[in-house]
Image (cartoon, rainbow, N blue to C red):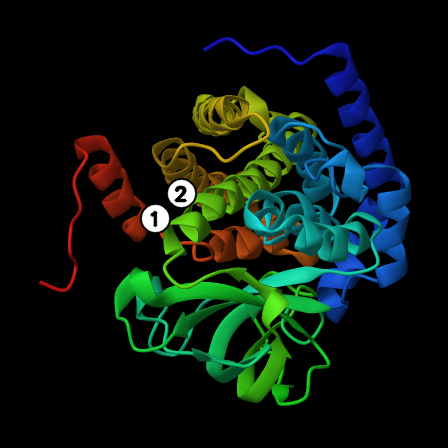
Amino acid sequence: MIFELTDEQQEIRALARKVARDWYAPKAREWDANRTNFPAAERKRIAELGLLALTLPEEYGGGGRPLIDALLVQEEFARANPLAAWPIFEASAGPSRVIDLFGTPEQKQRFLPPVAAGERLIAISISEPEAGSAATDVSTQARVDGDEVVINGAKRWCSGAGHADQYLVYVRFGQTPGGRGMGAVLVDKDTPGLSFGPQEELMGHRGVGSADMFFDDVRVPAENVIIQEGGFGKLFTAFSIERLGNSTMCLAIAQEALDRTAAYVQERRQFGKAVVDFQTVQDTLAKMVVDVEAARMLIWRAAVRAGRGAPKTLDASVAKVYANEMVKRVTDMAIQLHGGYGYAAEYEIERMHRDAIGWAIAGGTPAIQRTRIASEFLGRRFDQRS
């Protein structure tokens, strides 16, 4: 599949690169060290530039553009400062797209404009203590009570928990097991009965925030039900978009590690010559180039096929598996070629490696993705419980 960026896409990409490099790259190391949460004012700045919600419909304040355009912008921001790319990821490839694809006109009008304007951030809440990779084991209960929905349960590993303004919470309506009983409800952060545990101190993804969430008779309006009972297939479809967002974060980190390494090995001298003159270094650098280029082609193929909708599950899973494992390899090789400097915070390669490992866990591990790939390729389901 041959794909060339249009002039307009090149312009959007160039604008994103300039903003990210001039404004957010200098803050990356400090924000990582201090576990700084991305400032809401900065989110509004990105929105004013028209770069925050490129895939949301124009009538709700978005750009109305295809997924590939948003991923191009996300990559440039993530290369400069992964934390700065987070709100772009959530607005263009995250839970907002569930509302965009499956919400009612009234829900879209209520929930999407504040996201597009940078006024609100929506996070996705799926995992539980006993439901991680086994997403259909979610036990958090949602009970309809008149014109309200009452939620009880606990969530874990919610990226943005305690910091996001709203949460798309995967719940179980009634006692129907598996995906047939699942749906999703949008919950405001300040809703009575919703509380948060202490912030996790994670190896990477610093500043994004992660905490347990507790629902104790949390009441939300029934019109906040985005996906009704039995709509897990819709949630899974939308989640394929998130997987390309995840893959793009990996691509961005790997490309940045590659570029910095290429510059370093040409400047660094040992035994009287540039390090790059050693064949072993050339071989390692070539492996990094191949990995990064292959990941980009898989991601772009999936995104272009998706257009303004969701990518095929197989395309998204293939891209995610490769990108997740690629970024760990590439950042590891970058550390090796930097030697001791690769292990030093000053050079930021160690930060990239820490973040890389996190992206390979989030959104469905490579092991789970391989099962999904086999299932989609063969056109059959595999029950992990039997």
**Cβ atoms under marks 2 and 1 closer than 8 Å:** yes
Disc assigned to residue 325:
2
Residue 63: x and y in percent read 77, 33
Q: Nearer the viewer, residue 281 or 14?
A: 14
Furthest-left residue in this view: 386
Query: Which numbered disc covers residue 366?
Result: 1
User: Looking at the picture, which amino acid does disc 2 mark?
Assistant: Glu
SS at circle 2: helix
- Amino acid at the residue labelled 1: Pro
Choose mark 2 or mark 1, whichever is in front. 1
Residue 323, which numbered label? none
Ranked by sequence position, the earlier of labels 2 and 1 is 2
Q: In this view, does 213 lie to the left or right of 40?
A: left
Vertical relation: 289 (above or below) 231: above
Residue 36, image x, y percentages? 77, 67
Crowding at dot 2, Cα within 10 Å, few <14 / some 14-19 / many 20+, comes out as some
x and y, in percent, of residue 171 in the image: 44, 71
Q: Which residue is drawn at 70% across and 54% down?
A: 106
**Residue 209 seen by the camera:** yes
Q: Is residue 157 above or below residue 4?
A: below
Tell me if mark 1 has few (under 14), some (14-19) or many (20+) residues whose alpha carbon lies within 10 angstroms of its own. Answer: many
